Amino acid sequence: MDRTQKEQTIASLNTTLQGVGLVVVAHQIGMTVAEVTDLRRKMRAVGAGFKVTKNRLARRALVGTKYEKLDGLFTGPTAIAFSRDPVAAAKVVVDFAKTNEKLKIVGAGLGTQLLDPEGVQALAKLPSIDELRGRLLGMINTPATRIAGVLQAPGGQIARVLAAYAKKDEAA
């Protein structure tokens, strides 16, 4: 990798890091290409990303972002997971690490706050933004459904009463 490629990589990673809500740092020791590809596919499905990084380049890319405090976590074979939704990347990385011991979570940055591996696992247990939006929409929609049911009930009751009188007249 020549100097211009390194500078482009640093600039690209810096731009990416400035637009995300969470960066998870993990050690990926001995992961195969198939395993990394599978993890990347799962990350893309939730709107997140996963990148195997060179530590020196990643440290330089952190400069000027809110994740500068993560500098000390970049030792050994390192990869980062990132997403705008703070919960999405954490969920996928934690789930993948449960089934694959080759991926070890080292820590994370949530805005300017540092998280240890336990903090990342706690974050992964929270509902994602999409789940929260669905719950909120359901809560808003439920009263409207109930109101519609109540408003339709008198019309249905009148129809049943009229039908009962009609049957009574036919029987007579």
Image (spheres, rainbow, N blue to C red):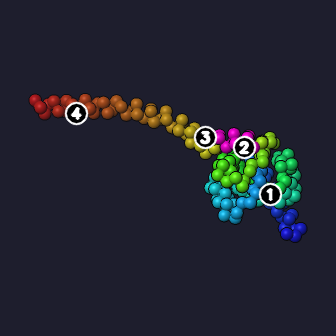
Mark found first going from the N terminus, 1 or 4: 1
Which residue is identified by label 2?
120
For marks 2 and 3, give the CA distance.
19 Å
Q: Left or right? Give the position of 82 relative to 4.
A: left
**Which circle marks residue 163 in the picture?**
4
Q: Mark 2 or mark 3, which is nearer to you?
A: 2
Which residue is identified by label 1?
77
> What residue is drawn where x is 53% and y is 38%?
138
Task: Pick the quarter of the image with the C terminus.
Answer: top left
Q: In the image as oriented, which residue stretches furthest toward the left? A: 172
Residue 22 inside the magenta-drawn segment: no
Mark found first going from the N terminus, 3 or 1: 1
- In the rendered view, tell whether residue 23 sits above or below residue 37: above
Q: Left or right? Give the position of 46 relative to 28.
A: left
**Which circle marks residue 132 in the picture?**
3
Q: Position of residue 88 (x, y in %)?
A: 66, 48
Mark found first going from the N terminus, 4 or 3: 3
Q: Name the secondary structure under disc 1.
A: loop
